[in-house]
């Protein structure tokens, strides 16, 4: 009786444990569906994926149950022990190996931690079995360590690596999410199909080619009853390329959370970059994630060089198991699109970067920019669920479409914003003809009494073929500060050369801040920034301008008050005029005219030499002066007068004779183009203009000379 009672008790205990396990699994499965992130439809309208046709596949497609992520389907790869599941892309939805491709999806790998089942794999393949591709399990049970794609290592007498590879999905590349450690070695590993992870971390992500012999490493175990009956046995491990692991957090894959995965294929250099954990499943916020890049030999995936591969997800469970689910955000080549957010401060005319500054009561513009880059179908049925930043009161909203034939605007009702959320359904599809649209909201930043950090917000854009996220920047909202700068000294100062001067003023502040910000005065003299000044307690300031900082003539000093957050006052301009002089900077002391022959006719003789006349006026811009010239009668060595004399010829052909009385030659107004106020009169002359010598036909043969006197007048003649 005692033995029978104990047996019954053990049976009852086993039944109770089994019931609790089923209930726990169902709870985890329901939790996965209730927390599923937003994704696309898989098998509605235009099916993108189909359940694998292999006879042992248990995969299904189900509706998710998260109210925050409507219109989403999940592929359930496995949800019980001893299962194999596969889901493959439909005909026409291939992975194009000749073009750059992107793909993103979410994986759920149960909540069993280090005690989880086997896991899943993302696969590219050209297996002849097409959508029926699967490992060759034979008549035996599902082999868990295959993850539905690797070879089946249950034959202890298999000596050839290629024979093992032939039992896998051929012509394939797999990215595995392995949640169970298959690391047996020695005699315990022979024929058990439980050694693929030998010498690698327990839970990991890695990639390789399931159908290639070099993927598998052979181990030999020698055993038996003495040397007569000794016979070698074999077991295998696989190489793990692009390994991602976290040995400090066992069970980091099967932790009851959805994990985001992004893949980027670069066709030019044949590299695949995969990133794990690059998005928060609850908020949609972009995260750094862990990234690896591996080189793919497309000849192993696509031996017939078709340029395409079927893509999908496989998975298995053994005695230990887990709920394996996948939610896809897009399909390769179906719609290549982008969504991003940009926040602009209209008041200060600048884009607000991550960690930027905004001031209370500023007007801002929030743009959600949607771009269609290419794809096999249009980007249609677009819905955006906008999570808007705090502390902004939006009062205008619209959608702007940008097409090759023009622009269109669709008005939105800003009062539809509830609890900082706005659902927007785009009235137009995006395609090659209309490749872009912007959801634009305009509003005013709230008034605050102290600096507040406004958190980044992530919005989702969904459709039947693409799910994207757009993230606003985190920024600091500062109290409004109104600064008014006044110069109490003169706005126009005149100082003597080599003399210092002072500028005084006061800054008045009005602010909503509980703590008044520190204010400084920034001074820029002649476009060169000077030392920044601190205000006195009463808001006054005194600024000393040194003589060596000033140039002769006009100087411009610009003053503006600034807070440490960048709020600015009005700009006040003080003009400082250093009294200057009008003088000749340089005049050629001795110059000549060319030798010439007398022809009996009147002629102009050209200059010989440099003939330099440079005037310097440091009295400031727009100061005007006139150059006067007079000449004595030119005579020969014998005292005979020259018939004629110096003349000044203008570019338009006018001529002025230079004789005994001063005559105006050139009038000029000093401008910033004149370096140091210098103007070279002679640089305007040509061989036929400027000062020439008029020789009349009745002149006698001889060598003539004379003096020209230059005079400056500070007013026009």
Image (tube, grey):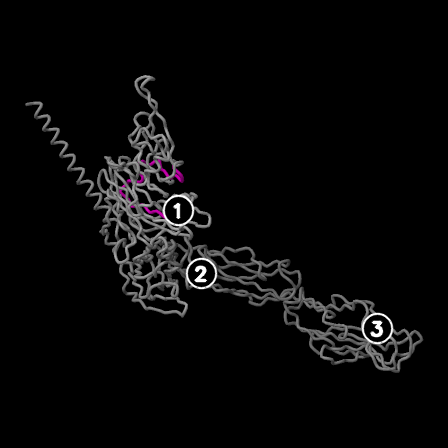
Q: Which residues are magenta?
A: 240-263
Residue 335: which quarter of the image?
A: bottom left
- Where is mark 1, residue-wise? 302
Indicate left or right for 68 with 163 as reference: left
Residue 319: which quarter of the image?
A: top left
- Residue 615: x %, y % from top left: 72, 68
Q: Earlier in the sequence, mark 1 or mark 2?
A: 1
- Where is mark 2, residue-wise? 350
How far apart marks 3 and 2 lie (CA) works out to: 65 Å
Say if 643 sits above or below 540 in the image: below
Q: Nearer the viewer, residue 343 or 356?
A: 343
Q: Secondary structure at mark 2?
A: strand
Say if 20 sits above or below 375 in the image: above
Residue 223: which quarter of the image?
A: top left
- Where is mark 3, residue-wise? 707
- Residue 593: x %, y % from top left: 83, 72
How far apart marks 1 and 3 lie (CA) works out to: 97 Å
């Amino acid at each position: 009786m005692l033995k029978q009672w104990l047996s019954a008790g053990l049976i009852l205990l086993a039944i109770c444990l089994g019931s609790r396990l089923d209930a726990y699994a169902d709870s985890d499965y329901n939790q996965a569906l209730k927390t599923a992130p937003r994704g696309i439809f898989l098998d509605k309208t235009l099916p993108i994926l189909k359940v694998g046709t292999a006879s042992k596949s248990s995969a299904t497609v189900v509706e998710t149950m998260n109210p925050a992520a409507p219109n989403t389907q999940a592929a359930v790869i496995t949800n019980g022990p001893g299962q194999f599941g596969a889901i493959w892309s439909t005909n026409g939805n291939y992975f194009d190996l000749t073009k750059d491709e992107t793909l993103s999806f979410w994986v759920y790998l149960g909540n069993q931690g280090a005690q989880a089942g086997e896991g899943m794999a993302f696969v590219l393949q050209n297996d002849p079995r097409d959508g029926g591709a699967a490992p060759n399990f034979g008549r035996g049970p599902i082999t868990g360590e295959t993850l539905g794609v690797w070879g089946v290592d249950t034959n202890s007498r298999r000596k050839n690596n290629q024979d093992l590879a032939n039992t896998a999905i051929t012509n394939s590349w797999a990215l595995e999410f392995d949640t169970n450690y298959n690391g047996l070695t020695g005699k315990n590993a022979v024929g058990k199909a439980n050694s693929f992870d030998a010498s690698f971390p327990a839970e990991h992500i890695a990639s390789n080619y399931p159908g290639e012999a070099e993927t598998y490493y052979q181990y030999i175990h020698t055993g038996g009853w003495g040397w007569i009956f000794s016979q070698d046995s074999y077991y295998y491990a696989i190489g793990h390329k692009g390994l991602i692991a976290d040995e400090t957090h066992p069970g980091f894959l099967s932790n009851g959370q959805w994990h985001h995965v992004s893949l980027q294929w670069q066709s030019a250099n044949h590299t695949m970059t995969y990133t794990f954990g690059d998005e928060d499943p609850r908020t949609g916020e972009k995260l750094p994630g862990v990234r690896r890049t591996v080189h793919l030999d497309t000849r192993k995936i696509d031996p017939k060089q078709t340029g395409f591969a079927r893509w999908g997800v496989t998975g298995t469970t053994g005695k230990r198991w887990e709920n394996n689910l996948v939610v896809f955000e897009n399909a390769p080549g179906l719609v290549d699109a982008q969504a991003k957010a940009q926040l602009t401060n209209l008041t200060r005319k600048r884009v607000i970067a991550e960690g930027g500054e905004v001031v209370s009561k500023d007007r801002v513009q929030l743009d959600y920019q949607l771009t269609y880059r290419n794809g096999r179908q249009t980007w249609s049925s677009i819905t955006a669920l906008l999570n808007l930043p705090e502390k902004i009161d939006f009062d205008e909203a619209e959608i702007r479409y940008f097409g090759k034939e023009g622009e269109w605007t669709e008005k939105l009702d800003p009062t539809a914003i509830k609890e900082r959320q706005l659902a927007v359904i785009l009235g137009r599809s995006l395609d090659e003809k209309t490749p872009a649209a912007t959801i634009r909201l305009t509003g005013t930043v709230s008034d605050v009494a102290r600096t507040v950090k406004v958190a980044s917000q992530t919005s989702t854009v969904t459709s039947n073929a693409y799910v994207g996220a757009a993230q606003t920047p985190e920024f600091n909202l500062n109290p409004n500060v109104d600064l008014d700068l006044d110069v109490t000294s003169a706005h126009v100062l005149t100082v003597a050369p080599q003399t210092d001067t002072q500028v005084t003023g006061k800054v008045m502040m009005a602010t909503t801040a509980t703590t008044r910000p520190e204010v400084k005065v920034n001074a820029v003299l002649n476009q060169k920034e000077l030392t920044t000044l601190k205000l006195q307690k009463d808001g006054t300031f005194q600024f000393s301008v040194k003589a060596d900082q000033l140039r002769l003539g006009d100087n411009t000093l610009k003053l503006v008050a600034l807070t440490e957050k960048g709020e600015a006052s009005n700009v006040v301009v003080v003009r400082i005029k250093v009294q200057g002089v009008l003088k000749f900077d340089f005049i050629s002391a001795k110059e000549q005219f060319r030798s010439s022959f007398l022809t009996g006719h009147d002629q102009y003789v050209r200059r010989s030499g440099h003939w330099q006349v440079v005037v310097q006026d440091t009295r400031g811009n727009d100061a005007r002066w006139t150059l006067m010239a007079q000449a004595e009668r030119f005579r020969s060595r014998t005292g005979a007068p020259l018939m004629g004399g110096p003349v000044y010829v203008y570019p338009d052909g006018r001529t002025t004779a230079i004789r005994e009385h001063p005559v105006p030659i050139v009038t000029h107004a000093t401008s910033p183009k004149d370096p140091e106020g210098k103007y070279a009169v002679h640089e305007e002359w040509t061989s036929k203009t400027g000062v020439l010598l008029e020789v009349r036909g009745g002149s006698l043969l001889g060598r003539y000379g004379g003096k020209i006197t230059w005079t400056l007048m500070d007013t026009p003649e």
